[in-house]
Image (cartoon, rainbow, N blue to C red):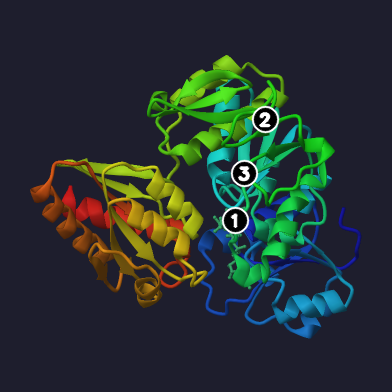
Amino acid sequence: MILSKLPTAIIGLGKTGISIAKYFDKNEVDYHIYDTRSNLIISKKIRNQIGTKKITLGPISIESINDHDNFIVSPGVSLEHNFITKIKSANKNIQTDIDLFDQEKRKNVLCITGSNGKTTVTLLLEHILNSLGKKAKAGGNVGLPALELLETNLEYNILELSSFQLEMTKKISCLASLITNITPDHLDRHKSFENYKYIKHKIFENSEKQILNRSDQNIYKTEKNITFSFGSDKPPNNSSFGIEFSKGLNYVIKGKERILCENEIKLLGRHNLENICASLAIINFLGLDINKALESIKDFNCVEHRMEKFHEKRNVHWINDSKSTNKDSTISAVNALKGNIILILGGRSKTNNYTDLEKVVNKKSVYLILYGECNQLLNKNIKTDNDKIVVKNIDDAVTEAYKVANFLLKKNKDKISILLSPACSSYDMYDSYEERGRHFKSKVIKDYR
Ligand code: UMA
């Protein structure tokens, strides 16, 4: 509840900011939007919907801060900004769209976070629940702002929450919550791994049930989360899920029973079996039919920009995994593939420690194409006996990758995967990993269809 005579400030005129403005219009809350980008072009649609009088672009002045008591901040805005420091030191109230969502007291809210796999688990859960005849929708970091879920009556509200969203959120109450895994990510913004872990665990604070990833030492075990768990090992009880490897194949197991084989599903890789275990742990906690859930998992296709196999010609498979913006995610992607792999890495680096990735690259038959702002850093930090090619951008990476594929095709008949799984953020050249992934796909389709 916003209690102030002054208009509420919305910081950021992106997807989140616009959804907050819509929500305030509906609830007759007066507001003003700020965006620090002076050169932002305001579309006709936004001008009609919000009106330019309610928008200020450019640096946020101290006078503007005094015009408001409440500030609803978009996830892309870092706490480090000096206007955030000023808002805080003026003792003003800072919240997020997730706090506003929480105040609506929706029933059956399921919250997902994690360093990797959170979007897959979120969309898989939405898919399973819908297949079971439940009205469920996913919002939050997955793309549809959380407040837009309020427009429909839902039996289940699924929220994917990023560390950016959790950082400034005061409270999110839910029926169940889950952290897929925690590995270092976004440390440029969150400063230390300890702080990042703390932010991720905020998802558990007001959750009736916590679903635990047993195999991840960075996730804290509590009394609340030991019953319904998932992991890459054997489950301790019948309400938990895990993975078993037998005769060359991985299986999902519930308690002691094998319930799904990796060759029955469209998702690639062992990490995706963990994502399936996570989703099933929630379905099981909700008391829903696991056998029907398994049937629906079999026809779940990959998610755009996550191990998305979008083109295949002459035994060359093109895969868009642009969502892999950290090295752990890229390691899972490489481990998910068999045969020759031509791996396109690059963008804006988040680390200079690529030792684990180097090990995986050398264990498998991986050829590297390094592009973007950190191409030289990657070249220096990842040593391999195979040829490495350093290029400027994705277009050149695609051209070079195809040349390597042709060379390999002449040498042997093994399957070749050309994988864009950059291990870095896209911000050196693109506004988002989605834009990078779409650019990659369009270049490939244009040149090699
Ligand atoms: N802005 C400022 N000042 C700043 C930073 C941003 O004014 O210091 C403005 C920008 O100029 C821009 C607006 O804020 O106009 C953008 O806001 P935003 O960056 O918060 O992005 P939204 O469009 O609101 O999208 C956000 C999430 N983006 C980020 O967290 C960066 C989307 O996640 C999410 O889908 C959407 O809300 C709906 O909930 C994207 C993402 O990249 C997919 N997430 C990261 C990830 O998955 O790794 C965390």
Looking at the rendering, which quadrant does residue 158 occupy?
top right
Dividing the image into four quarters, tell me where ligand 1 lies: bottom right
Badge 3 marks a residue whose secondary structure is loop
**Dot 3 surroundings within 10 Å: few (below 14), some, or many (20 or more)?**
many
N-term mark: 2 or 3:
3
| Amino acid of disc 3 | Thr
Number of dots carrying numbers: 3
Mark nearest the camera among 2 and 1 is 1
| Residue 86 shows in this picture | yes
> Which residue was labeled with disc 3?
180
Residue at x-position 50% and y-position 55%: 328
Badge 2 marks a residue whose secondary structure is helix
Circle on res. 261: none
Badge 1 marks a residue whose secondary structure is loop
Looking at the rendering, which quadrant does residue 434 occupy?
bottom left
> Which residue was labeled with disc 2?
282
The x and y percentages for residue 265 are: 42, 27
- Left or right for 176, reference 392: right
> What distance separates the C-alpha of mark 2 from that of mark 3?
12 Å
Residue at x-position 17% and y-position 53%: 405
| Amino acid of disc 1 | Thr
Which is more toward the observer, 174 or 153?
A: 174
